[in-house]
Image (cartoon, helix red, strand yellow):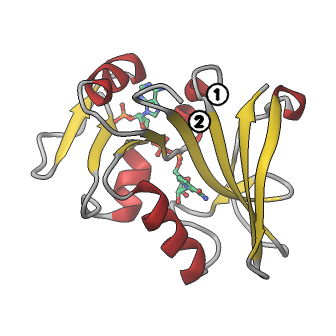
Amino acid sequence: MPKNAKIIVVAMTEQGLIGASGHIPWQIPEELRLFRELTSGHALIMGRRTFASIGRPLPDRRTIVVSRRLPATPGIEICCDLPSALRLAESGAGKIFFAGGVGIYRAALPLADQLSISWIRGEYAGDTYFPPFSANEWQEINEEDYGLFRRVLYRRR
Ligand SMILES: NC(=O)c1ccc[n+]([C@@H]2O[C@H](COP(=O)([O-])OP(=O)(O)OC[C@H]3O[C@@H](n4cnc5c(N)ncnc54)[C@H](OP(=O)(O)O)[C@@H]3O)[C@@H](O)[C@H]2O)c1
């Protein structure tokens, strides 16, 4: 892995659903715990609406928000596009996690080294979907089953 491994982290249903009215459609504490474990000590890059839905900078992580209109906010760094967010994240030593939403995922798909997908079981209502991607470009390297979801780690083939 390069110094700043670039990893997309997402929880989605088999249909690709990731959001509902600005929030996550499910409440699965175990999944949030894994997200915290995976990303702590590293940098997160997220879109403005994802940051708004979290509502605060996440502890122990560098939070870089991509937005052209968000005013300066304590505890986060703001960039107007993904390339500048990436340059900023690469100035640090840790991994770089692309944490959504759709525009960030779409722009990050050609750049990421790995995908961490929590495949959520069950049917949920919602309005926001992970962008289409070619599964055959990604090789599964680890899978863990947590009952309500399974987390699969992929690396680029
Ligand atoms: N299930 C999951 O793992 C997961 C993860 C993340 C988010 N979500 C859900 O997804 C929804 C939010 O996602 P979203 O797609 O609606 O919004 P989003 O990507 O979080 O935010 C959109 C805004 O971010 C900025 N932005 C995003 N991509 C950009 C790019 N490539 N270049 C420049 N600016 C960019 C723009 O901000 P400005 O308008 O300020 O310029 C844009 O209006 C919520 O429901 C959230 O809960 C789910």
Q: Is residue 103 above or below residue 141?
A: above
SS class of the residue under badge 2? helix
Front one among 7 and 133: 7
Q: Amino acid at mark 2?
A: Tyr
Q: Mark 1 and mark 2 in contact (Cβ < 8 Å)? A: yes
Q: Residue at x 64, y 70 (%)?
A: 25
The residue lying at 80 percent from left, 33 percent from top is 138
Q: Is 150 rendered above or below residue 103?
A: below
Q: Residue at x 30, y 64 (%)?
A: 55
**Residue farthest along the right direction in this orientation:** 136
Residue 104 locus on image (x, y percent): 52, 34
Q: CA distance from mark 2 to mark 1?
A: 6 Å
Image: 112 above or below 100: above
Q: Position of residue 140 (x, y in %)?
A: 81, 44
Mark 1 secondary-structure assignment: loop
Residue holding disc 1 = 109
Against 124, residue 3 (above or below) is above
- In this rendered view, identify the residue nearer to me: 40 or 59: 40
Quarter the N terminus occupies? top right
- The crowding category of the residue bearing disc 1, from other C-alpha atoms within 10 Å (few below 14, some 14 to 19, many at least 20), is some
Number of callouts in the render? 2
Query: Relative to the observer, which residue lies in front, 49 or 65?
Result: 65
x and y percentages locating residue 79 in the rendered image: 27, 27
User: Left or right: where does residue 50 sit relative to residue 30?
Assistant: left
Task: Count neighbours of disc 2 (C-alpha within 10 A) and say few if under 14, some if 14 to 19, many if 20 or more.
Answer: many
Image quarter of residue 137: top right
Residue type at mark 1 is Leu
Q: Is mark 1 within 8 Å of ligand 1?
A: no
Question: In this figure, which residue is indicated by the disc labeled 2?
Answer: 105
Task: From the viewer's perspective, tell me whether residue 54 is left or right of residue 106.
Answer: left
Label 2 C-beta lies within 8 Å of the nearest ligand 1 atom: yes
Residue at (23% x, 39% y) in the render: 70
